[in-house]
Image: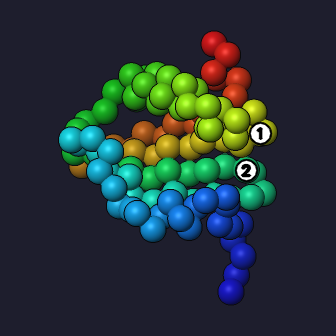
């Protein structure tokens, strides 16, 4: 096969086994991927609500920075990237790094 950098990162296969999974009333986590060359975990969500990108980002930063496990990953140089796909073709792309948590 062709290696496109989409590696199974720590825990990715285990995580995807339980997906898709409803996160809240409007959001479903569809998949998680890890690319080793740039150390990015990518979470793909679908949502039934239109989104305010700024509010969405603030909420995600707060949520991910308050998780000791995720913060430990980020402190090792990992980026957490969340892609939200809304019904109106809107896509919100949010990247969170350790530096975002210090603010």
Direction from residue 43 to residue 79 in the image, left or right: right
Which residue matches tag 1?
77
Quarter where residue 98 is shown:
top right
Give the residue at x 70% y 35%.
72
Q: Which tag, 2 or 1, sits closer to the chain's start?
A: 2
Which residue matches tag 2?
39
Residue 39 place in picture, x, y as percent: 73, 50
In this rendering, the answer to whether 74 lies above or below 45 is above
| The furthest residue to the top | 103
Mark 2 closeness class: few <14, some 14–19, many ≥20 residues within 10 Å: some
Direction from residue 70 to residue 31 in the image, left or right: left
For the residues labelled 2 and 1, the Cα–Cα distance comes to 7 Å
Tell how many labels: 2
Quarter where residue 68 is shown:
top right
Q: Is residue 29 visible?
A: yes
User: Would you say the residues marked 2 and 1 are in contact, meaning their CB atoms lie under 8 Å apart?
Assistant: yes
């Amino acid at each position: 096969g062709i290696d496109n950098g989409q590696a199974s990162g720590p825990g990715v296969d285990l995580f995807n086994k339980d997906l898709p999974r409803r996160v809240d009333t409007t959001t479903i986590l569809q998949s998680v991927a890890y690319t080793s060359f740039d150390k990015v975990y990518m979470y793909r969500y679908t949502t039934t609500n239109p989104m305010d990108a700024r509010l969405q980002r603030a909420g995600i930063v707060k949520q991910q920075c308050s998780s000791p496990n995720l913060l430990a990953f980020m402190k090792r140089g990992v980026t957490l990237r969340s892609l939200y796909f809304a019904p109106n073709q809107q896509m919100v792309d949010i990247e969170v790094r350790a530096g975002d948590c210090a603010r």
